[in-house]
Amino acid sequence: MPELAVENISKSFSGNTVLTDVEFTVAEGEFFTLLGPSGCGKSTTLACVAGLEDPDSGTIRVGDNVFFDGRRDTTVPPEGRNLGLVFQSYALWPHMTVADNLAFPLKLRKLPADERDRRVDAALDKVGLLELRDRYPHQLSGGQQQRVALARGIVYSPGVLLLDEPLSNLDAKMRDQARAWLKDLQRDMGITTVYVTHDQVEAMSLSDRIAVFLGGRLEQVGTPAEIYETPATPEVAAFIGRCN
Ligand code: ADP
Ligand code: MG
């Protein structure tokens, strides 16, 4: 049962503190959002969970599986963490078909060809793009490419899905559609999700709970209603657009 626990992680880059004692847990099946302005440390937090960066201190675990506890010899490498990653910058490979883009992470995991095909088609079916499996990325719209990136994030049934601003390259109309579709998919799959955005409306409409991040610290964690109705600090109130 994947409860993701991030305990007291801190991180600096060349003496510049980026995260200070960041702490949150995400329950099984929960849609949990890190919300904050650009530069506040959201992507760095996700990178630490994914193992692409190591915190300077703190603990990260999923269930009983400790990914990081400050000791280099026990740190679990990214490929051992069973996480699905969809980052804004994780573009599709242009020279591979949609199906091959999805099959690639399964090849790395050494799944046999028939099992790969089955999983690729199941993931494409989930995002409603099965009929586009043999196209190349440049033959798809931006919204379709984003769906393929999501399908690639879920194709090996990860325990936790990490989404870093996945809708930010879409135009406003597409973003509204994609938001509704993403929420349906997450609910349907029941997959534990950590979502990163700087967009207050997006966070409010998608999340079970939101962590408001300002300047590398968590200011408040709560449901959208709690955050909106009882912001913990004037800074949270200002950021989510409430004037107290
Ligand atoms: P967000 O995703 O909330 O916009 P980031 O986590 O990307 O914020 O960045 C937080 C801060 O850490 C920024 O000031 C950024 O410049 C800095 N930072 C992020 N990654 C690095 C890195 N690899 N080296 C140095 N500074 C970094
Ligand atoms: Mg970021």
Image: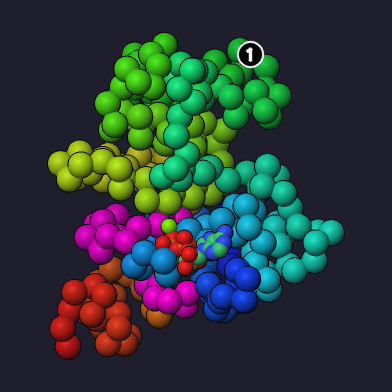
Is the residue marked 1 within 8 Å of ligand 2, measured from its CB? Answer: no
Q: Give the magenta range.
A: 193-218
| Residue 172 coordinates in the image, percent (x, y) | 17, 45
The amino acid type found where label 1 is placed reads Ala
Image: 167 above or below 134: below
* Residue drawn 53% across the image and 42% down it: 84
| Depth check, front residue: 202 or 190 | 202
Q: Name the image colouring.
A: rainbow
Q: Is residue 126 left or right of residue 60?
A: left
| Residue 27 appearing in the image | no
Image: 54 above or below 158: below
| Residue 44 coordinates in the image, percent (x, y) | 53, 61
Image: 218 above or below 3: below
Q: In the rendered image, which residue does mark 1 sit on?
A: 113
Q: Is residue 228 magenta?
A: no
Image: 118 above or below 234: above
| Residue 243 appearing in the image | yes
| Residue 242 coordinates in the image, percent (x, y) | 17, 79
* Quadrant of the drawing holding the C terminus: bottom left
* Residue drawn 84% across the image and 59% down it: 73
* Residue drawn 40% across the image and 80% down it: 219
Residue 228, quarter of the rendered image: bottom left
Q: Is residue 202 magenta?
A: yes
Q: Secondary structure at mark 1?
A: helix
